[in-house]
Image (cartoon, rainbow, N blue to C red):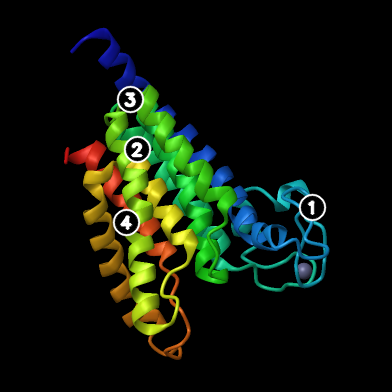
Amino acid sequence: MNALTVLHAQALPGLCAASMLLGAIFGSFLGVVAERLPAWVREEAGAGNLLYPPSHCPACQHRLSAWENIPLLSWLWLRGRCRHCRTPIPLRLLMLELLSALFFALSAGLAPSVGMMLCLWVLWCGLLPLALIDLREQLLPDCLTQPLLWVGLLINLHLHFLPLADALYGAVAGYLALWLVYWGHRLATGREGLGYGDFKLLAALGAWCGWQALPSILLLAALGGIVGWALFFQRQDRDHAIPFGPFLAFAGLTIFILQHLFFTF
Ligand SMILES: [Zn+2]
């Protein structure tokens, strides 16, 4: 065991704890992004921005003090209710902070390099708000999908996880694959089966994972979609579109993790 490995082993618990804290903070911020971005993208009146209006209770408008805004801890201290009007704070906010904290800590513990750890964090921060926004609003904003695509290409250009050509073909093929499905479905049925945001999200995932991973991503997303439909969407009427973005995001993240942390394919 060389000195660097010993140093890494000694620093690992601290690194994981710090990553967990950072993950909780990002989880809280990503929740705000998912909440506020759709109104801002649609330029709705009074949409505000990510910083304004400051965090407040949506029921009584009570402005949260600093100690009511601490990721994870505040929800527990307040026992999941607004201090002012006792309206329950949605459990999903706690889950976002908790999941992000766990993801950041696990990435720190398992990633083979600092570069890969940072890439996993960036991918998480891009995909989580996209999945949440698409789930609620059936929208995959360009201001998230497009930077994710460019960052995927730049990462493979500079960190060489994949040959740049594989990433570039991945982006092009990802876009075109769903573009073809969209037009095939539209010509056959006269209805839109997918949104343009789905093409851009798969293009971004192609840039991150390479063209070779696209069939696996699509297969996993389709399987996730079938399970999700059976569990949650079955009662909705047939004309109500099921968002595909959350399943694409889940599949893309899973395949990226499998590619780099467990297998090479
Ligand atoms: Zn309140």
Mark 1 and mark 4: Cα distance apart in space: 34 Å
Q: Are marks 1 and 4 in contact (CB under 8 Å)?
A: no
The numbered mark at residue 54 is: 1
Q: Which numbered disc, 4 or 2, marks the residue closer to the eye? A: 2
Label 2: which secondary element: helix
Is 126 on the left-hand or right-hand side of 159?
right
Which of these two is toward me, 183 or 25? 183
What separation in Å lies between label 2 and label 1 (alpha carbons)? Answer: 40 Å
Q: Are marks 1 and 3 in contact (CB under 8 Å)?
A: no
Question: Mark 2: which amino acid?
Answer: Leu
Specify whether 142 is left or right of 189.
Answer: right
Image check: 88 left or right of 182? Answer: right
Q: Who's the residue at 27% across and 55% down the image?
A: 217
Looking at the rendered structure, the secondary structure element under dot 4 is helix
Looking at marks 1 and 3 on the same chain, the residue that comes earlier in the sequence is marked by 1
Query: At numbered mark 3, what does the secondary structure look like: helix, strand or loop?
Result: loop
Residue 72 at least partly seen: no
Q: Which numbered mark, 2 or 3, is in the foreground of this view?
A: 2
Residue under label 3, please give it: 113
Q: Amino acid at mark 3?
A: Ser
Residue at the disc numbered 4: 251
Using the image as rendered, state which of residue 176 and residue 21 is in the foreground: 176
Q: Secondary structure under badge 1?
A: loop
Residue drawn at point x = 34 percent, y = 37 percent: 168
- Which label number is shown at residue 168? 2
x and y percent of residue 43 in the render? 75, 61
Mark 4 vs 3: CB contact within 8 A: no
Q: Mark 4 against mark 3, which lies toward the viewer?
A: 4
Q: Position of residue 91 (x, y in %)?
A: 55, 67
Label 1 is placed on what type of residue?
Pro
Crowding at dot 1, Cα within 10 Å, few <14 / some 14-19 / many 20+, comes out as few
Q: Is mark 3 within 8 Å of ligand 1?
A: no
